Image (tube, rainbow, N blue to C red):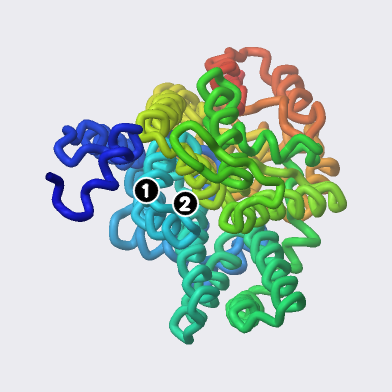
Amino acid sequence: MHKAGQGNLLPLRRRGLEPRANRPGAAALLAALVIGGGVALRFWTASHLWLDEALTVNIARLPVGRIPDALRHDGSPPIYYVALHAWMWMFGTGDVAVRALSGLFSVGTLAALPFAQRETGGRRGSTALLLAAASPFAVRYATEARMYSLLMLLVTLGVVAMAKLVRSPSVPSAIAVGLLTGLALLTQYWSLFLVGVVAAWLLVRWLRSREETALWGLTALAAGSLLFVPWMPVFLFQLRHTGTPWASPATIGAPLSAVVEWAGGYRDSGQLLALLLLALGALGLFGAGLDHRRIELSLRTRPAGRGLALAVFGTLAAALAVCAVTGSAFVQRYTSVVFPLFVLLAALGAETLLMPRVRHGVLGVAVVLGLAGCLSNIGSGRTQAGVVARAVNAAASPGDVVAFCPDQLGPSVNRLLRRGLVQLTFPLGADPRRVDWVDYAARNAAGSPAGFAEALAARAGVHDIWLVWSGGYRTLGSQCGDLRRLLQAGRPESVTVVTGSGRYEEHVSLVRYQAS
């Protein structure tokens, strides 16, 4: 005879819906290995800092009081820069040190995702954790000295706080939502789209049924948004004068490309993972598991999946619309603001697969494809700065002039060059540690390759000129190529030391012009 309460479990066990109590913990062991590997990958990359990272470090190492003015000329909000400033004060400015902060933020997101999954209707907190641990997108930005991992953490914590507030309103939950809202807005500007979509959703709920919980949520969002008000003058200046002059305008397919980017890009493993994640997301929105053989699909959608899908695709749609109107770029890394929400939606979809073997198999495929995408992050170079700097450092003499065209090549190379070299950027001969994005296209259009070449020759005198250049940058046309030809005419004794490589987006060449 069976003990009371156990008789009803046996049919479930025979159908594979309930694991046996004495079944070996192979799945748990594999999950632990994936999570441990995902954590390790968040601190493992060999590349030098690329442009945006080097710029970020150069701004963050300024005195805190000077950071806001520097950001007026950069185009970003301040929170991450202030956090990185404090971090570098404790741990230094080396590549590993500055990236470790993003790694810690990303590990924090992994720790918060199980709580967010349970708050959004999930039964197993480990599903979202596994998908995120093996995510190429999350790993890439965990190993980058930029604000995107911090943004993912704030959004994930915001899901937990907002779910608690809407379920059971309280002052502590409202304060948490408000604080996280303000921090997100001051971390990355696409948070404005997410906050707007969530506020619209809460407003509709309140107008339809006068739900008190919706009013609590709206109040918390509004209060949190007040934290952004002191930064508003800088934001408005950036809106008028900076932007994304370095990228192409948005296209209608940008949101779909974002999903592919989340899956690791357009390599085979990334495209397969994108299809799988989209399928899981669709199940999370429309599906409900009935038993191990059947999933019910409903066009009415699932409540938990509905909110997540609205937040994800509503935010992407709002961003696309604004980019289309303003002519700005739809930049895939900016979509990190909704990436954790998409992971939670895909995790809901995986939970509609009630048969453990099927669910584990699907998650296993997702993890394997994700880790395959992560591996390229370990040794792939994000910049040619190391190659260029090694060549200059090996042969340049004190007093030689290193010129950068465009100026965007300056920050990453400057970081690695030895002292004693004169460094100037086209078109204004500015310091290579920073790029001034204010009215960037107009300033470049007004640049004079002939005038800059003359200034370089006068400054170099009897010393060599080293030109770090690339011809593929927007807003510059043929100016950098023209500069190269003008220097060649003035100094015929030249040699190309480094040629542009297809391995890198920069396609940088290094030419040495020797004094006569």
Residue at 67% x, 13% y: name it: 492
Q: Earlier in the sequence, mark 2 or mark 1?
A: 1
Q: Position of residue 48 (x, y in %)?
A: 43, 35
Q: Amino acid at mark 1?
A: Gly
Q: Amino acid at mark 2?
A: Ser
Q: Which residue is mark 1?
A: 103
Q: Residue furthest right?
A: 325
For residue 508, say whether it is visible: no
Question: Which quadrant, please, contains the C terminus?
Answer: top right
| Vertical comparison of 148 with 279: above or below | below
Out of 330 and 495, give the one closest to the viewer. Answer: 330
Q: Position of residue 311 (x, y in %)?
A: 64, 56
* Horizontal arrangement in the rendering, residue 379 relative to residue 348 (left or right): left
Label 2 environment density (alpha carbons within 10 Å; few <14, some 14–19, many ≥20) = many
Residue at 40% x, 34% y: name it: 355
Q: Secondary structure at mark 1?
A: helix
Counting the numbered discs, the total is 2
